[in-house]
Image (cartoon, rainbow, N blue to C red):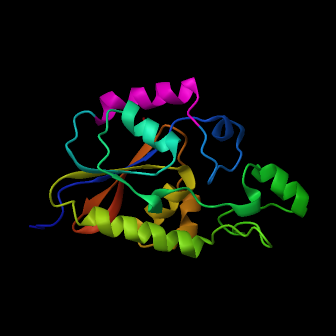
Amino acid sequence: MFDGPVGEIVVLRHGQTEWSRTGQHTGTTDLPLLPEGEDQARGLRAALGGREFVEVRVSPLQRARRTAELAGLATTAVDPDLAEIDYGGYEGRTTAEISAELGREWSVWWDGTVPGSSPGETLAEVGQRVDRVLDRARARLADGDVALVAHGHVLRALTARWLGLPPEAGALFALAAGRYGLLGHEHGRPVLTGWALH
């Protein structure tokens, strides 16, 4: 019998903001939740209420902190490593706008952030950040569940790293605003146990 971690990691994306609704890349810009986003967060109380969280780590940005609060999660740590990707000069812009400017299809997953004077973060740098978050979460799983409340792209990269994949594989794990996923174990191996739940 496997005698390893008993808990799961709940990765929860914040509720809807103005820019998540319009598809604008929102890294360091500290936007509030829309009323719809607040409703999404409140709606998570029932889904998550039966879990005993031994740790709740939250991005420092207000949209994540407010989502945790409205979802009924008691924050135990504000974790800068859970901040969204720094998009540099692509902050506030949509994928369609960036692609039109470049004259080809662009994606943060294979092109990265803007080159030049405002480069933002590389996915390798994001991978290092989320690996630190996962190390902290793994240390608590023997005691129960851990919640990570953050942002779409950083949580997708984190999920890829949990599964032993490069951060670029986060492209495979679409996660809408106000949704969550479950990272657990099967026969001692890290697996995805639920995704895009609400």
Looking at the image, which residue is at 56% across and 24% down? 35
In this picture, is 35 found above or below 172? above
Q: How many marks?
A: 0
Instruction: Please state which of residues 65 and 176 is positioned toward the viewer in this rendering.
Output: 65
Judged left or right of residue 119, residue 80 is: left
* Residue 102 percent coordinates (x, y): 88, 63
Looking at the image, which residue is at 53% across and 47% down? 175
In this picture, is 119 found above or below 73? below
* Residue 108 percent coordinates (x, y): 68, 63
Q: Is residue 48 visible?
A: yes
Judged left or right of residue 120, residue 156 is: left
Q: Is residue 55 magenta?
A: no
- Picture quarter containing residue 142? bottom left
Q: Is residue 46 magenta?
A: yes
* Residue 193 percent coordinates (x, y): 34, 52
Quadrant of the rendering where the C terminus is positioned: top left
Quadrant of the rendering where the N terminus is positioned: bottom left
* Residue 27 percent coordinates (x, y): 62, 54
Looking at the image, which residue is at 55% across and 66% down? 169
Looking at the image, which residue is at 78% across and 72% down? 115
The segment highlighted magenta reads 32-48
Instruction: Please state which of residues 30 and 127 is positioned toward the viewer in this rendering.
Output: 30
Q: Is residue 197 visible?
A: no
What's the magenta bit mostly, secondary-structure-wise? helix
